[in-house]
Image (spheres, rainbow, N blue to C red):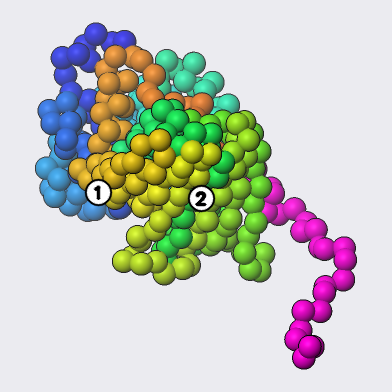
């Protein structure tokens, strides 16, 4: 740990001034004087506007100018996924620590280059997976550890919504193979961190297998024998623009919860109605608090590179499974028509 970090704020440059930068700017405010935000964009006017709106510490004419600046300690890579690896490597070589948005890289194997660069430079990379820090995720981990529903049998996670794109997310060269990769990876992280170890992955893509996926059904098998299903979609309207119900079933009861974390109801060895946390329902604030502690003390964050790589491994396994040939039924289709009997 650099002892000087105890006595000064973290100077962080946000590379990319889109939606992610807006969300992170709001969350970083909760660190108070411990964080000072700078902005950089391929559109310098956009960086200047964001700096004024969020009362930042400054702005840069380009991403490279921010990376090269001696005033910056950390860069947050908030660009499309295709640019993450190159930008992260350049920032590490320039002596910066890096926060990289999810999905972190296009391939799990890219973590090999990142880990090597971290060893060579002595710098660190944090993956901005806020779902790991969601109050709902923390509460579920504790409930399952307390065995309030006994042995877990099934986890049914509903992450179906209607999401319009019309931007870089429609370009596989920038965003990766599709919706599961670009957005569903958050829910993969959620399922991979309920306190059960994933051992096998299966996936099916509904409808024609053409172009980018916008819907996927993923099944995870855990070492305990439990099974989880994730229904993920960008093309189905949902109640109240996102209200979704999920459930976990165990041998001694069940847990019903709103997928975003609005409420949670336990019906097991004890009965509870919980509201995990409205103030930080998406987990961004807890994530940046953890990252700041890790940066200032030298310890590992709770969401470390090993977890991030595992998430990408699971997503890649899901795509391989979905692309495999479907096995047709061998027997003839029964005739179930009403025969008037």
* Residue at 55%, 61% in the rendered image: 215
Looking at the figure, which quarter contains the N terminus? top left
Q: Secondary structure at mark 2?
A: strand
Give the Cα distance between marks 2 and 1. 32 Å
Percent of width and height locating residue 305:
48, 27
* Residue at 39%, 25% in the rendered image: 302
Q: Is residue 198 visible?
A: yes
Query: Seen in the image, is 94 located left or right of residue 118?
Result: left
Percent of width and height locating residue 278:
22, 45
Q: Is residue 24 visible?
A: no
Residue at the spot of label 2: 156
* Residue at 22%, 28% in the rendered image: 11
Q: Please say whether residue 241 is one of the residues in the magenta stretch.
A: no
Looking at the rendering, the stretch of residues picked out in magenta corresponds to 315-341
Query: Mark 2 or mark 1: which comes first in sequence?
Result: 1
Task: Tell me the crowding category of disc 1: few under 14, some 14 to 19, or many 20 or more residues within 10 angstroms, Cα based.
Answer: some
Query: Which numbered marker is on residue 22?
Result: 1
Number of the front mark, 2 or 1 = 2
Q: Residue furthest front?
A: 341
Disc 2 + disc 1, Cβ < 8 Å: no
* Residue at 58%, 61% in the rendered image: 212
Percent of width and height locating residue 240:
31, 66
Query: Seen in the image, is 312 located left or right of residue 209?
Result: left
């Amino acid at each position: 740990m650099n002892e000087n970090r105890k006595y000064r704020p973290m100077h962080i440059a946000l590379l990319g001034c889109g939606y992610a930068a807006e969300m992170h700017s709001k969350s970083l405010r909760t660190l108070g004087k411990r964080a000072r935000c700078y902005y950089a964009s391929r559109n310098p006017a956009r960086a200047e506007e964001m700096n004024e709106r969020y009362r930042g510490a400054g702005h840069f004419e380009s991403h490279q100018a921010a990376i090269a600046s001696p005033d910056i300690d950390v860069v947050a890579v908030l660009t499309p996924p295709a640019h993450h690896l190159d930008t992260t490597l350049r920032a590490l070589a320039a002596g910066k620590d890096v926060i990289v948005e999810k999905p972190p890289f296009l391939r799990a194997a890219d973590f090999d280059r990142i880990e090597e660069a971290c060893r060579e430079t002595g710098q660190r990379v944090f993956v901005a997976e806020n779902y790991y820090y969601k109050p709902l995720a923390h509460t579920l981990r504790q409930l399952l550890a307390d065995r309030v529903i006994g042995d877990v049998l099934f986890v049914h996670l509903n992450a179906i919504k209607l999401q319009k794109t019309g931007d870089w997310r429609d370009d596989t060269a920038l965003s990766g193979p599709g919706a599961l990769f670009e957005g569903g990876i958050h829910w993969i992280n959620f399922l991979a961190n309920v306190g059960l170890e994933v051992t096998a992955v299966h996936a099916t893509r509904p409808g024609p297998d053409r172009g980018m996926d916008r819907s996927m059904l993923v099944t995870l098998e855990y070492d305990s024998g439990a099974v989880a299903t994730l229904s993920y979609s960008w093309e189905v309207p949902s109640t109240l623009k996102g209200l979704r119900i999920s459930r976990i079933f165990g041998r001694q009861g069940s847990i019903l919860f709103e997928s975003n974390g609005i409420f949670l109801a336990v019906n097991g060895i004890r009965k509870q109605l919980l509201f995990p946390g409205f103030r930080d329902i998406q987990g961004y604030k807890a994530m940046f608090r953890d990252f700041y502690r890790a940066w200032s003390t030298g310890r590992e964050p709770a969401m470390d590179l090993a977890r991030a790589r595992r998430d990408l491994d699971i997503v890649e396994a899901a795509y391989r499974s979905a692309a495999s040939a479907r096995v047709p039924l061998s027997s003839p289709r029964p005739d179930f028509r009403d025969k008037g009997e």
